Image (tube, grey):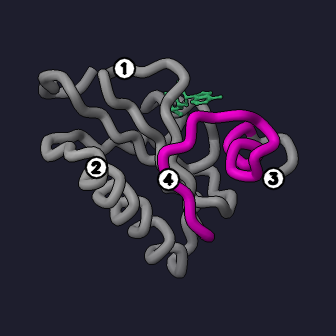
Amino acid sequence: MSDCLFCKIAAGDIPSSKVYEDDSYVAFNDIAPQAPTHILVIPRRHIAGISDMADDDSALVGGLFSVAKKVCAQKGITDYRLVINNGAGAGQSVFHLHLHILAGREMGWPPG
Ligand code: AMP
């Protein structure tokens, strides 16, 4: 989508601190980290959020978790939290699906 921030990051039109990329996914450091490690994993293809997934997007969405596992393994991170905010009321502020990887500090429960 032409006016989507994360589509522009995936395309390289807006700079980001990338930690991983392949044909389908990009992972980059969050610009306002909420933990010592805070990485976002996105599909290159624009999906606004989990509510906007089609049934045949299951593999693409599942792949976000595979990338998260790979990135954490490469960094030697064993304990981490994965978060997807869906909808503004749940804290979603960028409407291009993304998986947060948070690590490097104690994680409280329930999350705020
Ligand atoms: P959410 O609130 O779940 O939609 O998460 C959006 C995340 O994108 C937030 O954690 C922001 O800090 C992060 N963010 C916004 N703009 C950028 C950017 N240009 N580069 C990296 N992360 C960003």
Closer to viewer: mark 3 or mark 2: 2
> Label 1: which residue?
34
Query: Is residue 63 rendered magenta in the image?
Result: no
Q: CA distance from mark 4 to mark 1?
A: 20 Å
Q: Earlier in the sequence, mark 1 or mark 2?
A: 1
Q: Disc 1 and disc 2: Cα gap in Å?
A: 17 Å
Whether the residue carrying mark 3 lies under 8 Å from ligand 1 is answered with: no
Whether the residue under disc 1 has CB within 8 Å of ligand 1 = yes
- Graded by Cα atoms within 10 Å as few (under 14), some (14 to 19) or many (20 or more), the crowding at tag 4 reads some
In this picture, which residue range is highlighted in magenta?
5-23
Q: Looking at the image, do the residues carrying marks 1 and 3 touch, with CB atoms under 8 Å apart?
A: no
Q: Nearer the viewer, residue 77 or 112?
A: 77
**Which residue is rendered at x = 54% and y = 23% of the image?**
31
Within 10 angstroms of label 3, few (less than 14), some, or many (20 or more) residues?
few
Would you name the residue on which mark 4 appears? 20
Instruction: Give the distance between the C-alpha atoms of the residues marked 4 and 2, in whole angstroms.
Output: 11 Å
Residue 77 locus on image (x, y percent): 20, 43
Mark 1 neighbour class, 10 Å CA radius: few under 14, some 14 to 19, many 20 or more? some
Q: Which mark is residue 1?
A: 3
Answer with the quarter of the image where residue 21 lies.
Answer: bottom right
The amino acid marked with disc number 2 is Cys
